[in-house]
Amino acid sequence: VILQNEIIMTLLLSWVGRDSRKISSAYIASDSRFSWNNSTKFDYGQKVFSFDKTPDIIGYCGDVLYPTFILNQILNMAQEEILFDVNSDRYRRSEIIFTELKNKFNEYPGEVLDKSIEIIHISRDNEIDFLCNIFTWSKKNGWKKEEKEIPTISDKVIILGTGADEYYERYKEYYRGNNGKTSRAIFQSLCHSLLKMKDLKCGGAPQLVGLYNKFNGKRFGVVFEEQRFFLGKEIGNSEIINNIEWRNELFERFDGKSLKILD
């Protein structure tokens, strides 16, 4: 039963990329649709976030309202360096984020929340020490935290949401192809899924955040169906679009201004 005031979102995935020597990157991606039922939707909702001052990225699916409120507060506190010390290790940062999610939830009116919440948090120390935790809430079990194993090859970490099964079937097709076991295959299968998705609660453009071996969280622009999108929002041909890194549906590095593949 979809409550009148209930907003849900339904596809979220994470993966790591490996070069010839080591795990070199980690990503979280999602669709951009908020839906109230199969006919009422909003295709420009932000579902993935990156931290500017620490190597952390985060994304959520399930119920929308509480994660939208609290994750924006968490990011703002982290930006002002009042959430945790920027020198905190990945385990400490993840535990603080989880504690914030639980503590603020005690004040949230339970009658407006019926669906579960699932949140992916990926963090990094040094160049290659990645950590992925899944924070979940349900009426039956309350809040739970689970650490997910980081693959030793380029591969998915976890796929969440009601669109997960449909996505995974397409992912397996790409996995068996020439680009199998690459970040390209994972992102291509997401873009393909959003164009062909039978689950009408999934849709809109893909949105993407990531971590490299160096630097902090990173937000990517995505060229999807020959249009530019940034965290779900369509972007016009402005002067600032090359300030960010762009990827197309094939996960190729793209020039956001000319819409051409970069060397």
Image (cartoon, grey):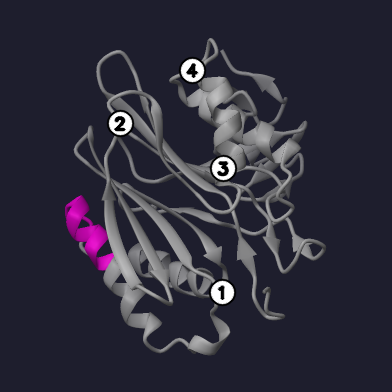
Q: Is residue 246 visible?
A: no
The residue singled out by tag 3 in the image is 165
* Cβ atoms at labels 3 and 2 below 8 Å apart: no
Q: Quadrant of the C terminus?
A: top right
Q: Earlier in the sequence, mark 1 or mark 4?
A: 1
Magenta stretch, residue numbers: 86-97
Q: Is residue 88 magenta?
A: yes
- For numbered disc 1, what is the local secondary structure? helix
The residue singled out by tag 4 in the image is 180
Q: Of residues 114 and 49, which is closer to you in this image?
A: 114
**Mark 2 packing: few (<14 Cα in 10 Å), some, or many (20+)?**
some
| Residue 199 horizontal/vertical position (percent) | 70, 50
Q: Earlier in the sequence, mark 3 or mark 2?
A: 2
| Residue 192 horizontal/vertical position (percent) | 68, 31
Q: Earlier in the sequence, mark 3 or mark 1?
A: 1
Q: Which tag is nearer the camera, tag 3 or tag 4?
A: 3
- Gap between marks 3 and 2, in whole Å? 20 Å
Q: Is residue 5 visible?
A: yes
Circle on res. 151:
2
**Mark 1 packing: few (<14 Cα in 10 Å), some, or many (20+)?**
some
